[in-house]
Image (cartoon, rainbow, N blue to C red):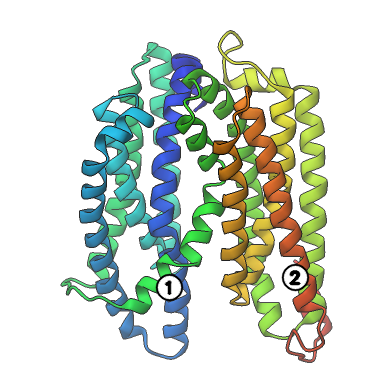
Amino acid sequence: MSFSGKVIGSEGVGILGVFYSFYNFTSFLLGSGFRDYLSRKIVELKAKGESEKIKDLVDESFTYISLVFLLSILFFLILKDLLLKKFFNNDFFILFGAFLVHFFSIFSSIGIGFLIGKRLFYAFSLVNILKGLFFLLFGFFYFIKGIDRINLFIVVYILSELSNFLFFLFYLIYLKRSFLFKINLNFLKGGIFSMGFSNTLIQSYFSYPILLLKLKNVADDLIGNFTAEISIFQAVKLLFNSYFVPVYPHISSSYYEGKRKKFFRTIVLSSILIFISLVFFTIFIVSIGKSFLHLFFPKNKFKFYTDEFLLLSLSLLFYLFSRFFSRVFFAIKKEGIVFKNLLLWLLILTLPFFIIDFKNKIIFLLSLNSFATFINALIFTVFFIRIFSLKGSIPFKEERLKDEDFC
Protein backbone atom coordinates (compact mmCIF):
# COMPACT_ATOMS: atom_id res chain seq x y z
CA MET A 1 0.00 0.00 0.00
CA SER A 2 2.92 2.35 0.66
CA PHE A 3 4.26 2.36 -2.92
CA SER A 4 0.73 2.59 -4.34
CA GLY A 5 -0.01 5.59 -2.09
CA LYS A 6 2.93 7.47 -3.56
CA VAL A 7 1.53 6.98 -7.07
CA ILE A 8 -2.28 6.89 -6.91
CA GLY A 9 -2.78 9.29 -3.98
CA SER A 10 -5.44 9.25 -1.29
CA GLU A 11 -8.36 8.73 -3.69
CA GLY A 12 -6.72 5.68 -5.29
CA VAL A 13 -5.80 4.24 -1.89
CA GLY A 14 -9.44 4.71 -0.88
CA ILE A 15 -10.62 2.69 -3.90
CA LEU A 16 -8.10 -0.09 -3.17
CA GLY A 17 -9.03 0.00 0.53
CA VAL A 18 -12.71 -0.58 -0.27
CA PHE A 19 -11.81 -3.33 -2.77
CA TYR A 20 -9.61 -5.14 -0.22
CA SER A 21 -12.13 -4.66 2.62
CA PHE A 22 -14.98 -6.06 0.53
CA TYR A 23 -13.34 -9.31 -0.51
CA ASN A 24 -11.63 -9.70 2.86
CA PHE A 25 -14.96 -9.46 4.70
CA THR A 26 -16.94 -11.75 2.37
CA SER A 27 -14.22 -14.40 2.09
CA PHE A 28 -13.70 -14.56 5.85
CA LEU A 29 -17.45 -14.87 6.39
CA LEU A 30 -17.63 -17.92 4.14
CA GLY A 31 -14.21 -19.50 4.75
CA SER A 32 -12.54 -18.70 8.06
CA GLY A 33 -14.86 -20.83 10.22
CA PHE A 34 -14.09 -23.91 8.13
CA ARG A 35 -10.37 -23.28 8.53
CA ASP A 36 -10.61 -23.62 12.33
CA TYR A 37 -13.23 -26.39 12.16
CA LEU A 38 -11.06 -28.50 9.83
CA SER A 39 -7.91 -27.97 11.94
CA ARG A 40 -9.74 -29.14 15.06
CA LYS A 41 -11.43 -32.05 13.26
CA ILE A 42 -8.20 -33.33 11.68
CA VAL A 43 -6.39 -33.27 15.03
CA GLU A 44 -9.32 -35.17 16.54
CA LEU A 45 -9.32 -37.81 13.78
CA LYS A 46 -5.56 -38.32 14.03
CA ALA A 47 -5.82 -38.71 17.82
CA LYS A 48 -8.46 -41.42 17.32
CA GLY A 49 -6.35 -43.18 14.69
CA GLU A 50 -8.93 -42.40 11.98
CA SER A 51 -6.73 -40.45 9.57
CA GLU A 52 -8.38 -42.12 6.56
CA LYS A 53 -11.53 -40.06 7.28
CA ILE A 54 -9.63 -36.89 6.36
CA LYS A 55 -10.44 -37.77 2.73
CA ASP A 56 -14.14 -37.40 3.59
CA LEU A 57 -13.40 -33.86 4.74
CA VAL A 58 -11.82 -33.16 1.35
CA ASP A 59 -15.04 -34.28 -0.38
CA GLU A 60 -17.15 -32.17 1.97
CA SER A 61 -14.88 -29.17 1.42
CA PHE A 62 -15.04 -29.42 -2.38
CA THR A 63 -18.82 -29.77 -2.21
CA TYR A 64 -19.06 -26.64 -0.12
CA ILE A 65 -16.60 -24.72 -2.31
CA SER A 66 -18.56 -25.67 -5.45
CA LEU A 67 -21.78 -24.50 -3.80
CA VAL A 68 -20.16 -21.23 -2.72
CA PHE A 69 -18.82 -20.66 -6.25
CA LEU A 70 -22.31 -20.99 -7.76
CA LEU A 71 -23.97 -18.86 -5.07
CA SER A 72 -21.24 -16.22 -5.42
CA ILE A 73 -21.92 -15.96 -9.15
CA LEU A 74 -25.63 -15.46 -8.42
CA PHE A 75 -24.85 -12.93 -5.68
CA PHE A 76 -22.57 -10.83 -7.88
CA LEU A 77 -24.94 -11.01 -10.89
CA ILE A 78 -28.11 -10.15 -8.94
CA LEU A 79 -26.48 -7.32 -6.98
CA LYS A 80 -24.20 -6.16 -9.80
CA ASP A 81 -25.72 -2.70 -10.19
CA LEU A 82 -25.83 -2.06 -6.42
CA LEU A 83 -22.24 -3.24 -5.90
CA LEU A 84 -20.97 -1.18 -8.83
CA LYS A 85 -22.68 1.95 -7.54
CA LYS A 86 -21.97 1.61 -3.81
CA PHE A 87 -18.53 -0.04 -3.67
CA PHE A 88 -16.73 -0.15 -7.02
CA ASN A 89 -17.24 3.30 -8.62
CA ASN A 90 -19.12 1.79 -11.59
CA ASP A 91 -15.95 0.00 -12.74
CA PHE A 92 -16.87 -3.52 -13.89
CA PHE A 93 -13.24 -4.72 -13.85
CA ILE A 94 -12.94 -3.94 -10.11
CA LEU A 95 -16.20 -5.85 -9.51
CA PHE A 96 -14.88 -8.82 -11.52
CA GLY A 97 -11.57 -8.69 -9.62
CA ALA A 98 -13.45 -8.65 -6.30
CA PHE A 99 -15.35 -11.80 -7.35
CA LEU A 100 -12.17 -13.66 -8.32
CA VAL A 101 -10.21 -12.69 -5.21
CA HIS A 102 -13.26 -13.39 -3.03
CA PHE A 103 -13.42 -16.98 -4.34
CA PHE A 104 -9.63 -17.56 -4.26
CA SER A 105 -9.50 -16.34 -0.65
CA ILE A 106 -12.36 -18.61 0.45
CA PHE A 107 -10.61 -21.60 -1.11
CA SER A 108 -7.33 -20.67 0.60
CA SER A 109 -9.00 -20.17 4.00
CA ILE A 110 -10.49 -23.66 3.80
CA GLY A 111 -7.23 -25.10 2.48
CA ILE A 112 -5.30 -23.78 5.48
CA GLY A 113 -7.40 -26.09 7.66
CA PHE A 114 -5.74 -29.08 5.95
CA LEU A 115 -2.17 -28.03 6.75
CA ILE A 116 -0.57 -31.17 8.16
CA GLY A 117 3.02 -31.42 9.27
CA LYS A 118 5.97 -29.04 9.23
CA ARG A 119 6.90 -29.53 5.59
CA LEU A 120 3.53 -28.38 4.31
CA PHE A 121 3.49 -25.47 6.76
CA TYR A 122 6.94 -24.38 5.54
CA ALA A 123 5.81 -24.73 1.92
CA PHE A 124 2.77 -22.53 2.53
CA SER A 125 4.90 -20.00 4.43
CA LEU A 126 7.21 -19.86 1.42
CA VAL A 127 4.22 -19.18 -0.85
CA ASN A 128 3.17 -16.28 1.40
CA ILE A 129 6.70 -14.86 1.47
CA LEU A 130 6.83 -15.02 -2.32
CA LYS A 131 3.42 -13.35 -2.46
CA GLY A 132 4.70 -10.53 -0.25
CA LEU A 133 7.75 -10.10 -2.48
CA PHE A 134 5.44 -10.15 -5.49
CA PHE A 135 3.47 -7.22 -4.03
CA LEU A 136 6.66 -5.37 -3.17
CA LEU A 137 8.20 -5.90 -6.62
CA PHE A 138 5.16 -4.73 -8.56
CA GLY A 139 4.56 -1.84 -6.16
CA PHE A 140 8.13 -0.66 -6.62
CA PHE A 141 7.90 -1.12 -10.41
CA TYR A 142 4.68 0.91 -10.61
CA PHE A 143 6.24 3.59 -8.40
CA ILE A 144 9.38 3.87 -10.56
CA LYS A 145 7.34 3.98 -13.78
CA GLY A 146 4.73 6.35 -12.29
CA ILE A 147 1.90 3.96 -13.19
CA ASP A 148 -1.32 5.16 -11.55
CA ARG A 149 -4.02 2.97 -13.16
CA ILE A 150 -6.10 1.40 -10.40
CA ASN A 151 -6.94 -1.65 -12.51
CA LEU A 152 -3.27 -2.64 -12.71
CA PHE A 153 -3.09 -2.69 -8.92
CA ILE A 154 -6.22 -4.89 -8.89
CA VAL A 155 -4.41 -7.32 -11.21
CA VAL A 156 -1.63 -7.66 -8.61
CA TYR A 157 -4.20 -8.62 -5.94
CA ILE A 158 -5.75 -11.20 -8.27
CA LEU A 159 -2.42 -12.82 -9.18
CA SER A 160 -1.19 -12.92 -5.58
CA GLU A 161 -4.35 -14.65 -4.31
CA LEU A 162 -4.27 -16.96 -7.33
CA SER A 163 -0.91 -18.32 -6.08
CA ASN A 164 -2.47 -19.46 -2.80
CA PHE A 165 -5.48 -20.88 -4.63
CA LEU A 166 -3.27 -23.02 -6.90
CA PHE A 167 -1.15 -24.18 -3.94
CA PHE A 168 -4.16 -25.54 -2.05
CA LEU A 169 -5.87 -26.87 -5.18
CA PHE A 170 -2.86 -29.08 -5.99
CA TYR A 171 -2.51 -30.09 -2.33
CA LEU A 172 -6.16 -31.20 -2.03
CA ILE A 173 -5.83 -33.11 -5.32
CA TYR A 174 -2.76 -34.78 -3.80
CA LEU A 175 -4.78 -35.75 -0.69
CA LYS A 176 -7.59 -37.26 -2.77
CA ARG A 177 -7.34 -37.75 -6.52
CA SER A 178 -11.06 -38.31 -7.12
CA PHE A 179 -13.93 -36.40 -5.53
CA LEU A 180 -17.51 -37.15 -4.58
CA PHE A 181 -20.12 -34.55 -3.77
CA LYS A 182 -20.91 -35.08 -0.10
CA ILE A 183 -23.10 -32.83 2.06
CA ASN A 184 -22.58 -33.01 5.84
CA LEU A 185 -24.81 -30.74 7.93
CA ASN A 186 -22.41 -30.92 10.88
CA PHE A 187 -19.63 -29.75 8.56
CA LEU A 188 -21.72 -26.76 7.45
CA LYS A 189 -22.83 -25.98 11.00
CA GLY A 190 -19.28 -26.16 12.33
CA GLY A 191 -17.88 -23.88 9.64
CA ILE A 192 -20.58 -21.27 9.01
CA PHE A 193 -22.29 -20.63 12.33
CA SER A 194 -20.78 -19.14 15.47
CA MET A 195 -17.11 -19.75 14.70
CA GLY A 196 -17.28 -18.55 11.09
CA PHE A 197 -19.26 -15.44 11.96
CA SER A 198 -17.06 -14.66 14.96
CA ASN A 199 -13.83 -15.11 12.98
CA THR A 200 -15.16 -12.80 10.28
CA LEU A 201 -15.72 -9.91 12.67
CA ILE A 202 -12.40 -10.52 14.45
CA GLN A 203 -10.31 -10.79 11.29
CA SER A 204 -12.18 -8.04 9.40
CA TYR A 205 -11.98 -5.56 12.25
CA PHE A 206 -10.44 -2.84 10.06
CA SER A 207 -12.33 -3.79 6.90
CA TYR A 208 -15.89 -3.45 8.16
CA PRO A 209 -15.63 0.27 9.14
CA ILE A 210 -14.27 1.11 5.67
CA LEU A 211 -17.29 -0.58 4.07
CA LEU A 212 -19.63 1.38 6.35
CA LEU A 213 -18.00 4.66 5.32
CA LYS A 214 -18.37 3.75 1.63
CA LEU A 215 -22.05 2.91 2.15
CA LYS A 216 -22.55 6.37 3.67
CA ASN A 217 -21.00 7.92 0.53
CA VAL A 218 -17.86 9.25 2.22
CA ALA A 219 -15.44 10.54 -0.43
CA ASP A 220 -12.72 8.17 -1.67
CA ASP A 221 -9.92 10.59 -0.75
CA LEU A 222 -11.10 10.71 2.90
CA ILE A 223 -11.40 6.92 2.97
CA GLY A 224 -7.90 6.74 1.47
CA ASN A 225 -6.44 8.97 4.17
CA PHE A 226 -8.26 6.88 6.79
CA THR A 227 -6.91 3.69 5.15
CA ALA A 228 -3.36 5.10 5.35
CA GLU A 229 -3.66 5.55 9.13
CA ILE A 230 -5.26 2.12 9.46
CA SER A 231 -2.28 0.55 7.64
CA ILE A 232 -0.10 1.55 10.61
CA PHE A 233 -2.40 -0.33 12.96
CA GLN A 234 -2.56 -3.29 10.60
CA ALA A 235 1.20 -3.65 11.07
CA VAL A 236 0.79 -3.54 14.87
CA LYS A 237 -2.01 -6.09 14.65
CA LEU A 238 0.27 -8.43 12.70
CA LEU A 239 2.96 -8.11 15.37
CA PHE A 240 0.49 -9.11 18.08
CA ASN A 241 -0.80 -11.94 15.90
CA SER A 242 2.74 -13.33 15.70
CA TYR A 243 2.79 -13.33 19.52
CA PHE A 244 -0.69 -14.86 19.84
CA VAL A 245 0.04 -17.80 17.51
CA PRO A 246 2.34 -19.68 19.98
CA VAL A 247 0.38 -18.46 23.03
CA TYR A 248 -3.00 -19.96 22.05
CA PRO A 249 -1.77 -23.60 22.09
CA HIS A 250 -0.02 -22.76 25.38
CA ILE A 251 -3.35 -21.69 26.88
CA SER A 252 -5.23 -24.72 25.50
CA SER A 253 -2.66 -27.23 26.74
CA SER A 254 -2.44 -25.70 30.23
CA TYR A 255 -6.25 -25.73 30.50
CA TYR A 256 -6.76 -29.34 29.40
CA GLU A 257 -3.77 -30.57 31.40
CA GLY A 258 -5.16 -28.91 34.53
CA LYS A 259 -2.24 -26.55 35.06
CA ARG A 260 -4.17 -23.75 36.74
CA LYS A 261 -1.22 -21.51 37.67
CA LYS A 262 0.29 -21.75 34.23
CA PHE A 263 -3.08 -20.98 32.62
CA PHE A 264 -3.74 -17.82 34.65
CA ARG A 265 -0.15 -16.64 34.48
CA THR A 266 -0.24 -16.75 30.67
CA ILE A 267 -3.49 -14.76 30.62
CA VAL A 268 -2.22 -12.08 33.02
CA LEU A 269 1.21 -11.66 31.39
CA SER A 270 -0.31 -11.45 27.91
CA SER A 271 -2.84 -8.82 29.04
CA ILE A 272 -0.09 -6.70 30.61
CA LEU A 273 2.02 -7.02 27.45
CA ILE A 274 -0.86 -5.86 25.24
CA PHE A 275 -1.53 -2.79 27.38
CA ILE A 276 2.07 -1.64 27.85
CA SER A 277 3.09 -2.25 24.22
CA LEU A 278 0.15 -0.33 22.77
CA VAL A 279 0.58 2.61 25.17
CA PHE A 280 4.25 3.00 24.19
CA PHE A 281 3.38 2.59 20.50
CA THR A 282 0.69 5.29 20.69
CA ILE A 283 2.95 7.78 22.48
CA PHE A 284 5.73 7.13 19.97
CA ILE A 285 3.55 7.56 16.86
CA VAL A 286 1.65 10.61 18.14
CA SER A 287 4.95 12.35 18.90
CA ILE A 288 6.27 11.77 15.36
CA GLY A 289 2.97 10.94 13.64
CA LYS A 290 3.29 13.18 10.62
CA SER A 291 6.86 12.15 9.90
CA PHE A 292 6.01 8.45 10.28
CA LEU A 293 2.98 8.57 8.00
CA HIS A 294 4.81 10.56 5.34
CA LEU A 295 7.60 7.98 5.19
CA PHE A 296 5.14 5.83 3.26
CA PHE A 297 2.51 8.25 1.94
CA PRO A 298 3.38 11.55 0.22
CA LYS A 299 2.98 14.71 2.32
CA ASN A 300 1.02 16.62 -0.33
CA LYS A 301 -1.64 13.88 -0.63
CA PHE A 302 -2.08 12.58 2.94
CA LYS A 303 -2.72 14.29 6.25
CA PHE A 304 -2.14 12.93 9.76
CA TYR A 305 -5.25 13.35 11.94
CA THR A 306 -4.32 13.05 15.62
CA ASP A 307 -7.92 12.62 16.84
CA GLU A 308 -8.54 9.76 14.42
CA PHE A 309 -5.26 8.13 15.39
CA LEU A 310 -6.01 8.27 19.14
CA LEU A 311 -9.47 6.78 18.62
CA LEU A 312 -7.98 4.04 16.44
CA SER A 313 -5.39 3.29 19.12
CA LEU A 314 -8.04 3.13 21.86
CA SER A 315 -10.30 0.82 19.86
CA LEU A 316 -7.29 -1.38 18.92
CA LEU A 317 -6.46 -1.77 22.61
CA PHE A 318 -9.96 -3.04 23.40
CA TYR A 319 -9.96 -5.11 20.22
CA LEU A 320 -6.74 -6.92 21.17
CA PHE A 321 -8.15 -7.74 24.60
CA SER A 322 -11.37 -8.95 22.97
CA ARG A 323 -9.53 -11.08 20.45
CA PHE A 324 -7.28 -12.58 23.09
CA PHE A 325 -10.18 -13.55 25.36
CA SER A 326 -12.25 -14.77 22.41
CA ARG A 327 -9.49 -17.24 21.55
CA VAL A 328 -9.45 -18.38 25.18
CA PHE A 329 -13.18 -19.13 24.91
CA PHE A 330 -12.64 -20.90 21.58
CA ALA A 331 -9.95 -23.03 23.22
CA ILE A 332 -12.33 -24.20 25.97
CA LYS A 333 -15.20 -24.64 23.48
CA LYS A 334 -17.32 -21.68 24.65
CA GLU A 335 -17.95 -20.35 21.13
CA GLY A 336 -21.45 -19.16 22.03
CA ILE A 337 -20.06 -16.43 24.29
CA VAL A 338 -17.91 -15.10 21.44
CA PHE A 339 -20.75 -15.23 18.91
CA LYS A 340 -23.22 -13.28 21.06
CA ASN A 341 -20.67 -10.71 22.20
CA LEU A 342 -19.43 -9.96 18.68
CA LEU A 343 -23.01 -9.74 17.44
CA LEU A 344 -23.51 -7.03 20.07
CA TRP A 345 -20.41 -5.22 18.75
CA LEU A 346 -21.84 -5.34 15.24
CA LEU A 347 -25.17 -3.86 16.35
CA ILE A 348 -23.62 -1.10 18.51
CA LEU A 349 -21.32 -0.06 15.67
CA THR A 350 -23.77 -0.31 12.76
CA LEU A 351 -27.22 0.86 13.88
CA PRO A 352 -26.30 4.28 15.38
CA PHE A 353 -23.98 5.00 12.44
CA PHE A 354 -26.86 4.71 9.96
CA ILE A 355 -29.56 6.22 12.19
CA ILE A 356 -27.64 9.31 13.36
CA ASP A 357 -26.12 11.68 10.82
CA PHE A 358 -22.89 13.39 11.96
CA LYS A 359 -20.93 15.88 9.92
CA ASN A 360 -17.60 14.14 10.57
CA LYS A 361 -18.60 10.56 9.83
CA ILE A 362 -15.12 9.12 10.39
CA ILE A 363 -14.78 10.53 13.92
CA PHE A 364 -18.32 9.39 14.75
CA LEU A 365 -17.63 5.88 13.43
CA LEU A 366 -14.36 5.61 15.37
CA SER A 367 -16.08 6.82 18.56
CA LEU A 368 -18.77 4.17 18.14
CA ASN A 369 -16.09 1.57 17.44
CA SER A 370 -14.13 2.47 20.59
CA PHE A 371 -17.30 2.26 22.69
CA ALA A 372 -18.40 -1.03 21.08
CA THR A 373 -15.00 -2.70 21.53
CA PHE A 374 -14.85 -1.44 25.14
CA ILE A 375 -18.20 -3.14 25.82
CA ASN A 376 -16.86 -6.27 24.10
CA ALA A 377 -13.69 -6.36 26.19
CA LEU A 378 -15.66 -5.70 29.39
CA ILE A 379 -18.13 -8.53 28.73
CA PHE A 380 -15.35 -10.97 27.85
CA THR A 381 -13.52 -10.05 31.07
CA VAL A 382 -16.67 -10.48 33.20
CA PHE A 383 -17.40 -13.90 31.65
CA PHE A 384 -13.79 -14.94 32.11
CA ILE A 385 -13.83 -14.03 35.82
CA ARG A 386 -17.24 -15.61 36.28
CA ILE A 387 -16.23 -18.91 34.66
CA PHE A 388 -12.73 -19.34 36.05
CA SER A 389 -13.33 -18.02 39.57
CA LEU A 390 -15.40 -21.12 40.29
CA LYS A 391 -13.67 -23.98 42.03
CA GLY A 392 -12.99 -26.83 39.64
CA SER A 393 -13.35 -24.64 36.55
CA ILE A 394 -9.98 -26.02 35.44
CA PRO A 395 -9.50 -29.77 35.99
CA PHE A 396 -6.86 -30.16 38.67
CA LYS A 397 -3.74 -32.05 37.82
CA GLU A 398 -0.52 -32.22 39.79
CA GLU A 399 1.94 -29.73 38.39
CA ARG A 400 5.65 -30.06 38.12
CA LEU A 401 7.93 -27.10 38.43
CA LYS A 402 9.34 -27.56 34.96
CA ASP A 403 5.83 -27.44 33.50
CA GLU A 404 5.07 -24.16 35.19
CA ASP A 405 7.73 -22.23 33.28
CA PHE A 406 6.15 -19.74 30.89
CA CYS A 407 7.83 -19.55 27.56
Residue 384 is labelled as: 2
Kind of residue sitting beneath label 2: Phe
Q: Position of residue 388 (x, y in %)?
A: 78, 78
**Residue 123 in sight:** no
- Residue under circle 1? 190
The C terminus lies in which quarter of the figure?
Answer: bottom right
- Side (left or right) of 277 relative to 299: right
**Residue 163 in sight:** yes
How many neighbours does mark 1 have within 10 angstroms: few (below 14), some (14-19), or many (20 or more)? some
Q: Position of residue 254 (x, y in %)?
A: 71, 78
Secondary structure beneath dot 2 equals: helix
Q: CA distance from mark 1 to mark 2?
A: 23 Å
Question: At 69% from the left edge and 21% from the top edge, which residue is drawn?
Answer: 305
Quadrant of residue 277 in the image? top right
Earlier sequence position, callout 1 versus callout 2: 1
Kind of residue sitting beneath label 1: Gly
